[in-house]
Amino acid sequence: MTKYTIGVYKAFKNSGNLRFHKKGTKKSWKHYFIEMDDYNESEHSFGSEWVSSIKAVILKRKQLYKKTFVCLDCETVYTEYVKKNQNESKNCPNCDDD
Ligand SMILES: [Zn+2]
């Protein structure tokens, strides 16, 4: 299983159901990710975990962004999680080369 970061946000750890958080409660980082099966990418689940601030910085750098792509071969519109600066995708679900 490989984890793909889709978001890292600051949140109150002990917020729970309380309307007001306790005084002195430190903010922590929450890491949201997709856990993908290495052999079958359609098998994936969403998850979240608490991480340290140092790990949050590292994860943010590798974070993926949901972007919309259009396949020029079959004109299918699809979304995919890609790196921030990636502006094209060759993973059209309709034109699967495999
Ligand atoms: Zn296509």
Image (cartoon, grey):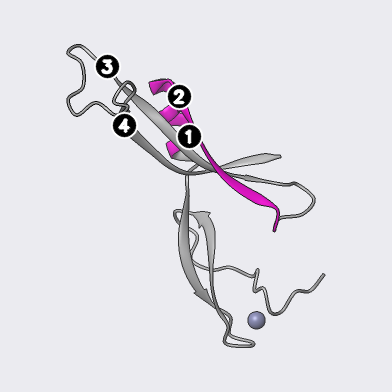
Work out how far the residue at label 4 is from the one at label 3, CA to CA, in angstroms: 10 Å
- Quarter of the figure with residue 25: top left
Residue on which disc 3 sits:
26
Q: Nearer the viewer, residue 73 or 15?
A: 15
Q: Looking at the image, is mark 4 or mark 2 earlier in the sequence?
A: 4
Question: According to the image, label 1 marks what residue?
Answer: 59
Label 4: few (<14), some or many (≥20) within 10 Å?
some
57 up-or-down from 69: above or below: above
How far apart marks 4 and 2 lie (CA) works out to 10 Å
Marks 3/2: CA distance? 13 Å
- Circle 2 residue: 51
Mark-to-mark CA distance, 2 and 1: 9 Å
Amino acid type, callout 1: Leu
Tell me the amino acid under the disc marked 4. Answer: Lys
Please tell me whether residue 34 belongs to the stretch shown in magenta: no
In-image side of 88 versus 54 (left or right): right
Q: Which numbered dot is residue 10? A: 4
Q: Mark 1: which secondary structure?
A: helix
* Gap in angstroms between the C-alphas marked 3 and 1: 20 Å
Give, as a three-letter code, the residue at label 2.
Val
Instruction: Residue at 67%, 40% (x, y): give it.
Output: 2
**In x, y percent, where is residue 26?**
27, 16
Which range of residues does the magenta coloring cover?
42-60
* Quarter assignment of residue 71: bottom right
